[in-house]
Structure formats: C-alpha cells, structure tokens
Amino acid sequence: MSESSKRLLSALMVLGAQSPERAIAIDELAARLGLGAQEIESDLKQLVDAGYARMVREPGSSRVYLTGTGIITASSTYS
Amino acid sequence: MLSWEYPPRIIGGLARHVEGLSKALASMGHEVHVVTLDFPSAPYEVEEGSLYIHRVAVDVPAPTFHSWVLLFNHFFEKRLGQLARKFGVPDVVHVHDWLTVSGGVAAKHLLRAPLVMTFHSTEASRSSNSPSPESAMVRGLEWWGSFESARIIAVSGWMRSEVVSMFKVPDEKVKQIPNAVDPQKFEAPVDTQAVRSKWKVKEGERLITAVGRLTSQKGFDDLIRAYPLIRRAIPASKLLIVGDGYMRGELEALAEREGVRESVTFAGFVSETDLVGALRSSDVVAVPSRFEPFGIIALEAMSAGAPLVVSRVGGLAEIVEDHVDGIEVEPNSPVSLADATIRVLSDRALSARLAEKGMEKAKAYGWNSAAKKTLETYREAVAESRYE
C-alpha cells in the first residue's frame, strides 16, 4: 500500500468514518488532508477495491467510510 | 479492563488475550468490565454472566492517530465514570499497552483504584528505536504507565527483561504471566478435506500456513522468498497466508516476482472457525516474525496439532523448544526457513512428533492458570497501591 493510501486509511479512522451513518464527504476528507478531491480519487478507489472502504453514493456528492477490515488494517499500521 | 481491541475488533494478540483473560476471570465469579472501542455490527453493550463489554464510540474527529488515541481515552474515562456510579468503584483498573495508559492513570487517581498494566510489546522494539516525536510520545506513555502501575504484567520473560531495564522499574514489580489458549476451541471437529478444498489445496498437496497482520514485523516477505526453495524440494504444496494489513499489495507483488503467485493464497481476515480449520488442516505452520514479544499464534498452532517452524526471537524462542515441539530458525533468513519447512514436510515421523509434543505443551497454557496468576497480581496491587 502506498504511503498516501495509508494516510487516507488512517485519516478515515481518526475522523470517525466507521459506518455508513458516520461516512465523511469526499470533499471534506480531502480538505482535512490539505488536498483536492481529485487528488485522493485514485487512492480512495484502491481502498474501496481492496475492501477497506465503502462509498455512499448520493446525488451531487459521495461519502466514504471504513469497513471492519479497513479499521483493522488502519489500526495494524500502529500496533 | 481497558483495551483498544476486543473481538471482533482483532488487531493482534491483545484482543484475544483480553477476551481469554476476562472470560476466565468472570468464570471464577469475578465481575469484569471491559471498556473498548466500537466496531461495525458489534453491540455496544454485552452482558455474559458477570462479564460486561462496553463498546465506546469516539464522536470527535482527531487530526492524527496519536491524538486520536488520547481522545478515545477521554471517552473511556467518561464511560468508566458512568460505570463507577452504576456498579461501584472497581477494585483494580487494568490497562493493556500504551494505548490505554492515559485513561487508566486518570481512573486510578479519580476513582482511587490501583492500576495494573500489561505489556504485550514495547514501542522501542516495534519501531526499532525510531527517533520520531510520535514514537517518543508512545515511549513516554509506556514509562508513565509503568511508573503509575502498582504492578506490571509482562507476557514473556523477554518482555519482562525489556520492561525492567528500559523503564528502570523494581524487579519485583513486574510479573511474568504468559498468554494462553482455549484448547477446546482448537479441539472442535474439523472437516479438513473441506477446509483444504476451500483454500484450493489439491489431493496430495502439502499445506503451509502462516497467520498474522501483514506488516514487516511478521516476516511474511521472508516466507514468500523461502517458498520457491520449498517448492523445489516439495513441488506439490500450497502456501496460505491468513490476515491482512498494509503490506498485502507488496506481498502479492513479491509472490508474483518469485514466480509462486498461483500457489500462494492471501485469505485476508477470516472467522475464528476458519482460523481453527486452517490450523487444523495444515501440514506446517510457519511463524517467521522478526520481532515477537509472545506470539500467541504459536500456541494456537500447537493446540491445533500443527507442526511449527518459528523464528528464534523474543517470546517465540521461550514457547518453542527447538526440535522438541517445533523447529526454530534464524530470523530474516529465507534459507533457514525453507530448510526447516522442507524437513518438517518431508519427515512424517518428525512432523507427528512435533505436533504431539506441541499439543502437550499447549495444555499447560490455559486461561484459568493465567487468570489465577493475574488475580494474585491484582491482590498485590491492592495491597501496595498509593495515590500521590
């Protein structure tokens, strides 16, 4: 996993995006990392493809949250 | 008990340790409350006899992992306050590793309850003495926990020596209480043919299994480098890697480069039933860690009757008696790992002897024994606690 994907994974966990109800808007996630939404698109796709994150599609915007596997993987970076 | 992980939130051995210990203490009639982090689909409150699990949501965003840890400890403190009002002040507050030290120290002073800390590992070893500010903070929390605790538990002799020397704590303050296993879990009937078929192990093929987080510490890259050497001697074999982690992509790519990708299965995280099934169906279980304060997977493999090949590091070297109930190999050495694995796979008598002796040894590591030693440690902590 690239360093930028790891950073994204960790950000989702510490921002509390751990369920569909607590999913975070992609714009907001990018802003928290000091990036634009397009800059995190590719890493986000990788996390979704790997089963670490899921998207909540909404008209006009999308939100994202970590799956159980994503939470464990994000945590395992530090333990 | 404060722990950042509790099943189904299983990051490492710590979750299974807290589960095994808390269940054993509760089965002895003690009231045990575990305060832990929430997890998708896990209920927030669980009551099983005198064991209570309280899962806590962290409702405030944090900028970094390390600030998030301090933040979730505040949420733990709030829950502890609520529990103290409802159930009374606990006799002991028990924290596990640096992650819950700040909550535990706050509880000690606010509730006037003695603190006990278990070291499952240390930052210095995990991070190879990283000079980063985050690592310094973690080491500071470890020192603080060791200072504030009336008693410290270390999960192996190696861990105990490290804690005594690193944090300059009196020798008698640190108790060595090893991790344990629930043998019943591994004695359950398993349809090994169905399990092997699930992991695409063909008739006559040998199954090599490794379990753990896919991080550098676990040495799975060494195992993948060893695997082509193993296949040269034993072509009919499969390698099953159970677990997930940030190195998954790198390890998959490495298997590709080594020309063995088709024979390596990355199972990801699996259920307890699948884990038991995999261990029970394996011809050898490899634990190629570079650093391992205890290595609970070694005990689990022994309990499941799987012959073991382990790195000669930390707690693993204490659990396994070389060539008696497992084979020890040099860490960071794919050649040494391949050599030992080939020996176990080619010599059925050796393999059967290691498995039999391993099962015998695992029986000595029960949770009831660990719980009794922990209770004794709690009593000492109660007798000697001070609140400056």
Image: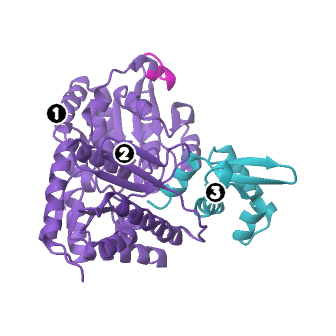
Q: Residue at (21%, 24%) from the top-left corner?
A: B349
Q: Is residue B31 magenta?
A: no
The kind of residue tagged 2 is Val
Q: Chain of mark 2?
A: B
As drawn, the label of residue B335 is 2
| Chain B drawn colour | purple
Q: What range is drawn magenta here?
A: B195-204
> Whole-percent x and y of residue A43?
70, 56
**Which residue corresponds to mark 3?**
A17
Q: Is residue B232 visible?
A: no
| Chain A drawn colour | cyan
Q: Nearer the viewer, mark 2 or mark 3?
A: 3
**Furthest-bottom residue in this view:** B388
**Which residue corresponds to mark 1?**
B360
Which quadrant of the structure image shows residue B362? top left
- Label the magenta part by its dominant secondary structure: loop
